[in-house]
Image: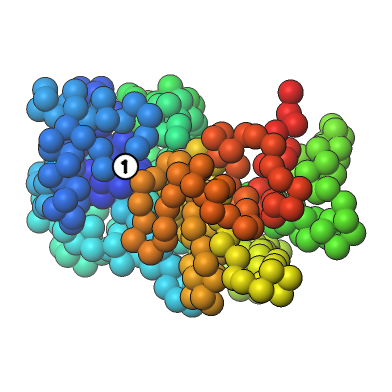
Amino acid sequence: MNKTVCVVGLGYIGLPTAAILADKGFIVHGVDILKSKIETINSGKSYFYEPGLKQLIKKNINNKRLTANLSPKEADIFIIAVPTPFKKNYTPNIDFVIASIESILPYIKKNNIIIIESTIPVGTTKKVEELLKNNNLDTSNIHIAHCPERVLPGNIIKELKENDRIVGGTNLESTKIIANFYKSFVRGEVFITDDKTAELAKLTENSFRDVNIAFANELSMICEREKINVWDLIKLANKHPRVNILNPGAGVGGHCIAVDPWFIIKSNENESKIIKKAREVNLNKTKWVIEKIKKSALSYEKKKNKKPTICCMGLSYKPDVNDLRESPSIQIVQSLLEQNFKVIAVEPNIDKHKNISIVKYEEGIRKADIIVWLVAHKEFKFIKRNDDLDFCGISETIYKT
């Protein structure tokens, strides 16, 4: 079995993957462009919280199976795990993937494995193969595949080991070789396919969830107009054996669901009408929430003749994590601040934010004239006031038995 791995991109996927591989006996060379990350990791720590991650890093830094550096080096296996954001017009941006491949070009040799774990538009794996060819590398003896991650923040270590994986290579031989690599540390099943199918599979998974959430968000707006409790409605509808409606929220955030559908839409504009409409619904839900909060604040100001202090409960993109990526709560708070509303926030999973005043729960409740529930963190499981604005179903959390 090949033993040396170079992981390019030590983010929310790359760093846990590197730590797990080191713990399985591989010699892992991690690479990132941020010196602060490198220093933190090499000191045996993680720069973000994920259960079990710090212990894995410390153990494998100490036994020298894991190191972090600013540049790549020779390895048997290269894993690309860098971000793939979108540009201002929602066009997918694969610049980090291409830059990562260019950074490893001097180190690639015969029989190397190159795996792209980053979420990518359909056809990107083929572009990587072409990039290698254009740099005079013989791709007939280099194994290239896409293997998308599918993990949940807060449970990444467990799911990297236990979730099923999809491997799609540029040819069948490469697919089988890379599938065997994953079988060395993944307890779930490893399914093989071609590269384009693997690329679209990941985008499909997150687009499906986005569409489902859009349906729930539409229901929440209908229910508000009809004065119906949307949480009760969904709970009752889900009693049907073939219905599984997700919960609405203040929008959709995170590194996947809020981003990946655009990768399909931008390549298939005429064929992705439902996917595009779902994205628009979820983006508009955040704007709808902002308008509801503004209306409540202006009504308070008119009655009391003073600006209310608005306390927003929760900033992360989902409950019980410290991940703020694409968080609708952040967008909501920043929008209110830009419009000169007085806003403070309670976020039990982070200590501070550069633009937002973070306070403890007790202080937030004491200072608040209007309380806005945006994220249903476990710390928030208590009875809310009747005049609170609830956009995350905290009342549903309370009344569960």
- At x 51%, y 63%, the residue is 343
- Quarter of the image with the C terminus is top right
Q: Tell me how many marks there are.
A: 1
Residue tagged by mark 1?
48
Q: Is residue 339 above or below residue 75?
A: below
Q: Where is residue 281 in the image (x, y as percent from the top left)?
A: 69, 65
Q: In this view, does 255 lie above or below 348?
A: below
Viewer-side residue, 201 vs 168: 201
Q: How crowded is mark 1: few (under 14 residues within 10 Å), some or many (20 or more)?
A: some
Q: Where is residue 242 in the image (x, y as percent from the top left)?
A: 82, 36
241 left or right of 45 in image: right
Q: Where is residue 61 in the image (x, y as percent from the top left)?
A: 14, 29
Viewer-side residue, 401 vs 270: 401
190 left or right of 375 in image: left
Q: Is residue 399 above or below residue 148?
A: above
**Residue lying at the far front of the rendered structure:** 305
Residue type beneath disc 1: Phe
Viewer-side residue, 222 vs 295: 295
- Tag 1's secondary structure? loop
- At x 49%, y 31%, the residue is 164
Q: Where is residue 3 in the image (x, y as percent from the top left)?
A: 17, 29
- Quarter of the image with the N terminus is top left
**Residue 182 in view here:** yes
Viewer-side residue, 24 vs 338: 338
- At x 62%, y 58%, the residue is 369
The coloring applied to the image is: rainbow
- At x 49%, y 58%, the residue is 344
**Residue 193 in view here:** no
